C-alpha cells in the first residue's frame, strides 16, 4: 500500500472507503494510517491503524489515538476486521455476509413455520376429538 491508496472495509451496513494517509515502517512490518473518506456515524472521519499479515491481508490493528474514546460507543463494527484494496472484492464480501444473514433468517422462519404447522395440526386434532366426544353424548 502507498499513501493516497484507497482501501475498503465492508461492515454490516455499508462499505466504508479509507484513504491511506501515513505509513510507519519498522524492521519487520509496516503500520498504515488510514482515514475514512466520509463520516462514520457521529464520530466523523475516523482514523485507523492497519497492517498486512503474511498473506498480504490488510487487517485492522486499532484506532488512531484521537478516536480511542469512540471505540467504546459501538464503533467496532465500522472499523474492525479485514480491509480490501479492491472495491469489488469488498462488495463481494459485503453481499456474501448479507446472503448468509438472510439465509439464516430463512432457515429460522422455516423451522418456525414447521413448528406452527405442527401446533395447528395438534389443535385441529383436539378440536376434532372434542367434537367426536360431543356427538357421542
Image (cartoon, rainbow, N blue to C red):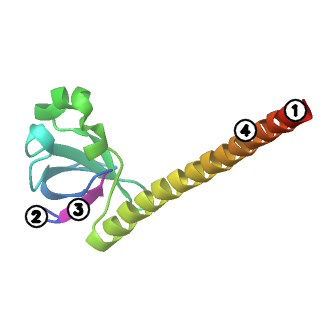
Closer to the eye: label 3 or 2:
3
Tell me the element at label 1: helix
Residue 133: give its label.
1
Viewer-proximal residue, 129 or 39? 129
Q: Position of residue 77 (x, y in %)?
A: 31, 42
Looking at the figure, which quarter contains the N terminus? bottom left
Q: Earlier in the sequence, mark 4 or mark 3?
A: 3
Which segment is the magenta one? 6-11
Q: Is residue 86 visible to the viewer in this orientation of the structure?
A: no
Q: Residues under labels 4 and 3: Cα distance?
A: 57 Å
Q: Earlier in the sequence, mark 4 or mark 1?
A: 4
Tell me the element at label 3: strand
Q: Position of residue 90 (x, y in %)?
A: 32, 65
Q: Position of residue 99 (x, y in %)?
A: 46, 62
Q: Residues under labels 1 and 3: Cα distance?
A: 72 Å
Q: Position of residue 65 (x, y in %)?
A: 15, 32
Residue drawn at x 26%, y 33% is: 74
Q: Residues under labels 1 and 2: Cα distance?
A: 81 Å
Residue annotated with mark 4: 123
Residue annotated with mark 3: 7
Is 3 rendered above or below residue 118?
A: below
Q: Earlier in the sequence, mark 1 or mark 3?
A: 3
Secondary structure of the magenta portion, mostly? strand
Q: Was residue 121 drawn as part of the magenta stretch in this picture?
A: no
Closer to the eye: label 1 or 3:
1
Amino acid at each position: 500500500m502507498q499513501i493516497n491508496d484507497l482501501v475498503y472495509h465492508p461492515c454490516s451496513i455499508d462499505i466504508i472507503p479509507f484513504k491511506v494517509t501515513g505509513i510507519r515502517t519498522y524492521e519487520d512490518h509496516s503500520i498504515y494510517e488510514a482515514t475514512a473518506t466520509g463520516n462514520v456515524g457521529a464520530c466523523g472521519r475516523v482514523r485507523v491503524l492497519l497492517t498486512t499479515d503474511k498473506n498480504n491481508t490488510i487487517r485492522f490493528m486499532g484506532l488512531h489515538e484521537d478516536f480511542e474514546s469512540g471505540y467504546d460507543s459501538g464503533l467496532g463494527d465500522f472499523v474492525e476486521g479485514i480491509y480490501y484494496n479492491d472495491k469489488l472484492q469488498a462488495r463481494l464480501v459485503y453481499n456474501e455476509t448479507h446472503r448468509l444473514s438472510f439465509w439464516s433468517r430463512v432457515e429460522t422462519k422455516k423451522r418456525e413455520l414447521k413448528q406452527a404447522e405442527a401446533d395447528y395440526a395438534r389443535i385441529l386434532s383436539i378440536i376434532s376429538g372434542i367434537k367426536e366426544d360431543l356427538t357421542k353424548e
